[in-house]
Amino acid sequence: MFYNTKSTAKGIAALLLLSATFSACDKHDHGTEGELITTIQVHLTGPGLDKTFLWNDEDGDGGSVPAIDTIVLPPLTGSITCELSVFDRSKDPDENITEEIEAESADHLFTYTINGADFSITYADQDANGKNFGLKTLWVSDQPSTGSLNIKLFHEPSDKGNLNSPGGDEDFNVVFPVVIR
């Protein structure tokens, strides 16, 4: 749906609501405008695998359609290490937001939802309080299959033990296509 933000107050409100989906957490902690999240990088390493996959929306939410890599995994692998990185590439130089998120790990939670593809994900890191964090995870693929992976970053989740609905605000919500072959 397209909103003409110049002619209606509803359009402005909707645009602000949509853009909030991709703003990072500085606004929550310090009362300043949040960073723009333009790029999510998924770096996978494991047996015969060292690849980086990107979700990239250079102009931020509401503009051009994001460019999204298909994550390709070999079948029946041992443990694959995944490390996420989060960037604002609208700035020159690019701003790596990952370190800020990691420094505020107790206030953040990455969640992963697999649809259709035959692999599993377990958390390989914890926040400052020993609870799930998810910047680093371990993946194990199984049979050849196709599906998707939804990755979300929550700010100030109320229940880090509930990975389906942890509460808090979503800083981003992205979907990658996944193929195991």
Image (tube, helix red, strand yellow):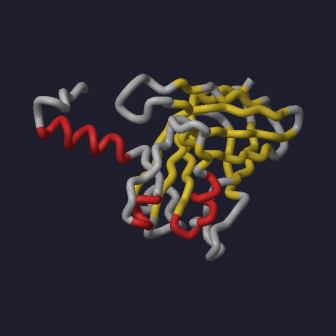
Residue lying furthest right:
48
Query: Viewed as shown, does residue 172 lie left or right of 106?
Result: left
Can residue 115 be seen at all in this image of the molecule? no
Is residue 74 positioned above or below 140 on the image?
Answer: above
**Residue 47 higher or lower than 63, as above or below:** below
Q: Nearer the viewer, residue 54 or 132?
A: 54
- In the image, what residue occupies the spot 24% across and 25% down? 2
Residue at horizontal 82 percent and vertical 34 percent from the top = 50
Q: What x and y, as percent, mark residue 91? A: 53, 38
Q: Tell which of 120 and 102 is nearer to you.
A: 102
Write down the quadrant of residue 47 in the picture: top right
Q: Residue at x 50, y 63 (%)?
A: 162
Residue 102 appears in the picture as rendered? yes
Q: Position of residue 80 (x, y in %)?
A: 79, 43
Q: Is residue 41 above or below residue 4?
A: below
Q: Quick one: 156 or 178, which is closer to the camera?
A: 156
Left/right placement of residue 162 relative to residue 119 reads left
Q: Position of residue 98 (x, y in %)?
A: 62, 52
- Residue at point 82% right, 38% down? 77
| Furthest-left residue in this view | 8
Q: Position of residue 153 (x, y in %)?
A: 51, 52
Q: Quadrant of the N terminus?
A: top left
Q: Count of labels shown?
A: 0
Does 169 sit above or below residue 54?
below
- Residue sticking out furthest to the front: 92
Quadrant location of the C terminus? top right
